[in-house]
Amino acid sequence: MASILSLAEAIRETVRDGDTIALEGFTHLIPFAAGHEIIRQAKRDLTVIRMTPDLIYDQLIGAGCVKKIIFSWGGNPGVGSLHRLRDAVENNWPQPIEIEEHAHAGMAVAYSAGASGLPFGMLRGYIGTDLVKYNQRIKFIDCPFTGQKLAAIPAHRPDVTVIHAQKADRRGNVLMWGVVGVQKEAVLAAKRAIVTVEEIVDDLHAPPNSVVLPSWVLSAVCEVKGGAFPSYAQGYYQRNNAFYKAWDVVARERDSFKAWIGRHVLGTKDFGEFKRSIVSASNEGAPANA
Amino acid sequence: MPELTYTADEMMTIQAARMIRNGVTLFVGIGLPSAAANLARLTHAPDTVLIYESGTIGAKPNVLPLSIGDGELSETADAVVSIPEIFSYWLQGGRIGLGFLGAAQIDKFANINSTVIGDYNKPKVRLPGSGGAQEIAGFCGEVMITLRHNNRAFVNKLDFLTSGGYFEGGDSRQKLGLPGKGPTNVITDLGILTPDPVTKELTLTSLHPGIVVEQVIAATGWPLKVAPKLDATAEPTANELSILRDLNARTARAHAGQA
């Protein structure tokens, strides 16, 4: 059964230095609040898995939490580069980073395999591409029935998966909807799972066939209103595209990044205070929300 | 009637939109492909089914999404499915007619690079990487590619082959066993390139208004083949321009309004 905890307690009890963790959420429902708490608690030497690293891993990388990243698309969607990821890859700042790179379908089948208790996922992909030259964990096998050449990717089995969802009930059952990405697979592939939610309610009123993660597959559920900001939670708030654009300016230089993380993440005690901090910076005329 | 003025990017987007058949199932990359796909839907191709890799099937966005999974897409979609499902059942399962991609680099056989400029381990510029591009290039019935035409993009040798077009040319794609037939059109801000039916080498087949062959040759990093009889791309119409500009203006307002 999931414990209903504060986010700080959940991260403290669940995430350990050196863990392999997956913070998933495909554009929608990205667990930013949990990412910030990992930075505040100065977790180190993490291997981080995520299809689309996005700003959340840019922040974790710049803050020095990450030793290896496993991903399939590392950019700021619609804006450009993840400057902290690039600085780590290109200049080893703040520390060298190992990268293991896939394509989306490969990541999807690797999570599905992890959730299914299979040693690897497979797909008809990667054939003839250069990724297979640089990622030794993409192999090819022959179909035992047809002889067809198929790509095989080792299963993802995170120590901890963290996701954000719309609702939980008081027993810790979780309901999510909209773009649900690969979160269900990522949770079921993991040894431990934390879910932050917009609200905890008496009854989920979940229609049949909804995406519901039962309490007994989760370690902790935490109520964090707005915890996916600047991504979005369908039915609650929209994606803050202006923040994504402003991040390009913040993250471009080490000093501006350090100042931002120092003031808004390390200098605040929780996500509520973080939100107030960036609103007040915005009122001072700092670059939008930054 | 006064002559219309328009930019090279507008010409590229409008021509790319024109090449989308009404009713096709279309897997859309973000950026230029998304703008062209939505322009097509708002003009001659209202029944086009737009599919984004976030799992949104039949999306009908009123403004262009900044990311591949904006709420605008899921709220207007016919169906929203999970990531494993969109890639396994829909894309790899062979349900998608047309894939539409951008790229940082392209070679003469329409192979594309969206991973890295320079050496992979010592990159000059680290780009986002494949995302779903290599599966889109592999599994859609056919593929269209749109990008700006210059020497940095149209290269003799890719720094990294992210997504396969015709690989070494000829029948090399078929030999690798990829199901889709590969790229059928490359639309740039200068013209249109199509693969030779046998060698699969990209050949300049149409010039946009005001562009001369020498310009395209100079902007291409390999000795470009030119069709014996070149088509002339039609100028953007006032209607196409006004719909595209309205779409871009709505999008800019929507994306700025959330600060």
Image (cartoon, coloured by chain):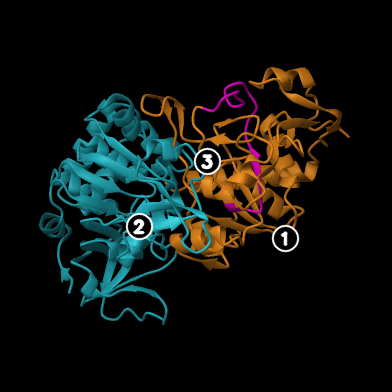
Chain colours: A cyan, B orange
Classify mark 1: residues with Cα within 10 Å, few (<14), some (14-19) or many (20+).
some
Chain of the residue where label 3 is placed in the rendered structure: A
Residue B30 sits in which quadrant?
Answer: top right
Classify mark 2: residues with Cα within 10 Å, few (<14), some (14-19) or many (20+).
some
- Residue A286 in view of the camera: no
Query: Which image quarter holds the N terminus of chain A?
Result: bottom left
The amino acid on which the numbered mark 2 sits, given as a three-letter code, is Phe
How many angstroms separate mark 2 from mark 3 (CA)? Answer: 20 Å
Q: Is residue A272 left or right of residue B208?
A: left
**Compared with residue B210, is residue A132 higher up or lower down, i.e. above or below?**
below
Residue position for label 3: A128
The amino acid on which the numbered mark 1 sits, given as a three-letter code, is Gly
Residue A16 on image: x %, y %: 13, 51
Residue B24 sits in which quadrant?
Answer: bottom right
Residue position for label 2: A120
Residue A124 on image: x %, y %: 51, 54
**Compared with residue B133, is residue A97 higher up or lower down, i.e. above or below?**
above
Q: Secondary structure at mark 1?
A: loop
Query: Which image quarter holds the C terminus of chain A?
Result: top left
Q: Which residues are magenta?
A: B139-158
Q: Secondary structure at mark 3?
A: loop
Q: Nearer the viewer, mark 1 or mark 3?
A: 3
Is A20 part of what is drawn in magenta? no
